[in-house]
Amino acid sequence: MNGHPLLQLAAVHGRDSRGPAGRAVGALRGVSVTLEHGIHAFVGRPADGTLALIELVAGRRRPSVGVVTVRGREPGSHAGTRRKVGALLDTAELLPARTVAELVAQIGALHGADLSGCLEAFGASALAARAPASLDRDEARSVELAVALSLQELLVLALYEPFTRTRLDADAVCGGVVAAAERGGCVVVATSTPADLRALGGVPGSVHLLERGRLWGRDGAIGWPPRPGRALRIWLEPEHVRALGAALSGRSELAAVSWEAAADRPLASILVSGGDADEVALAVAETVSGLGTPVHALESEAPSLELLLDAARREREAIEARSPYSPTPRNPGGGAP
Amino acid sequence: VTTLGALAGGARLAQGRLARRAFAVVVFLAIAVTVTYAFVARHGAPLDAPGRSIGLVLRWVVPLAAFAVVTLSLAGSRLDDSVWSIARHGVPRRLVALGSCLAAIAAAAVLAAACAALGLAAAYGGAHGFGGDVATSLWIAALGAAAYAAWFSLGGAFLRLGRGRWVPLLLDFSLGATAGPLALFWPRAHLENLAGGAAPLALSQPSSSVALAGMAVIALCLAAMRAGD
């Protein structure tokens, strides 16, 4: 602890290098944010700068303008700081080794940590005997993620899409991310799937929305956490799906009803959505009780990235309309201006 | 991580990248071109064959083979990016880059020496004088390759994907072929001098040897510094 924020980005411009011929897929444009311990999610597409954000925080690249600091030092230009930052990038770059187990041991030696059980802890013990060169992209990312989540002394953990394109046990990954935050670390998760973040609830942190390299807002300003009930998923026995789905389709309160039932799954689900959360919940409750359908579970669907962007735009427009500097003259009385 | 450990890590990284089929193709091409040219030269003019053969090695094979070796050791990225897999764990980039460049320099030097030896063997074809000539040519080719590889490593520390390595290659072919003051900075001029050709600014052969060695050391240090912490 030296008085500096755990992680700070100050007017950062920078890009990633994952496009064809080393070109950028996305870039950050003047991002400033200060983060302390907890889980901080950045929702957006790679083209919006999520990958650039993780590469800059990990020290993979240095910002072209501005500064990224971890406890006051730049991971991009200070090796000692980089040692305290764990990362999962778009593509894993593994140390040269004969087997994955040897590779993990080498990384453990570099960090002075015992990582012998890290693959088993995340359900990836089958990879231990493989040669790193034989791993496909997802498997290599899995090794990188298992190692990053197992290192105990990290200050910052920067994870790019940790819940997709890996072969690790999802619950174990969630547990590892939460544990890293609870150890006092700052976990930065970049994802294009807001649903991923629901499993990480309950830990102090924030959710930010990135669009075209700029931060649009965080938490309430982007409609996070989502209001429950505007879209509900109903889990039930497959034989009741058609009857309940048909009954729900007749409810005027619901804008959309769709269902999924697969022969190889024990439960089917019906997804309903509507304009008002209370009306959706009431319509579902009335229909289910009217038919006497046994329901296993109800869950509210996480909003999509597009919904978050819409919410952020609406919030921004509302702020601009309230502003005395708004270009549109205000007319609170409702009469002719 | 100790300095030696970081250097060894960088060397292993480059070694891993060179232990692939692409490097075998480079080795095969370099040797095939050298030996074929030497055979053709011996059948045309046996007395001139050793000189022409070593001329081909020093003017073409050494720079192009060194360029290919450095390109492979960088794995298609800039020098500081190419060492990320080790540097991410808190090892200074400059040390890993230094180890990686040293491995590339060693590989280029060995390949150049092998080409020089095989080219001369094919050119002499058992004739008298091979022993003395090969002893001199081996170290000239190795020293030249080291200077080239260091220059290309420095160039590879600039521009996207390390494309800066093309700059010394092009400048060497253009400026290094002259005998003016600008030729002093490029290995080609000094190799020409050591092979018995025109000397840049009438420099002596020992001076050219020192210039090549100095070039290798300075370019190597600058490349490592450019990689950063």
Image: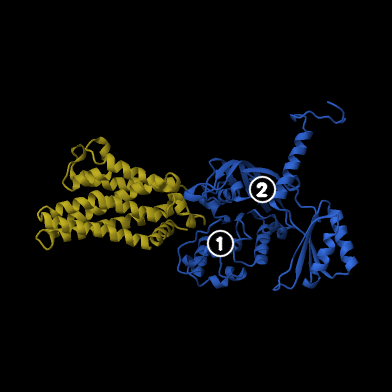
Chain colours: A blue, B yellow
Q: Nearer the viewer, residue B11 or A189?
A: A189
Query: x, y percentage for residue A292?
Result: 88, 69
Q: Which residue is the site of mark 1? A: A141
Residue, x 87% and y 63% (percent of image)? Answer: A287
How many residues crowd mark 2 within 10 Å: few (<14), some (14–19), many (20+)? some
Residue under the image location 11 percent in, 52 percent down? B48
Residue B134 visible in image: no
Q: Amino acid at mark 2?
A: Leu
**Of helix, strand and loop, which one carries label 2?**
strand
| x then y, percent, for residue B160 | 45, 46
Q: Residue at x 82, y 60 (%)?
A: A249
Q: Quadrant of residue A330?
A: top right
Of labels 1 and 2, earlier in sequence is 2
Q: Give amino acid for label 1.
A: Arg
Please tell me how many numbered marks the rendered image carries.
Answer: 2
Chain hosting mark 2 = A
Residue A35: mark in rendering: 2
Q: Quadrant of residue A271?
A: bottom right
A115, above or below B93, in the image: below
Q: Is residue A251 left or right of residue B224?
A: right
Q: Which mark is residue B14?
A: none
Q: Residues within 10 Å of mark 1 (few under 14, many from 20)?
A: many
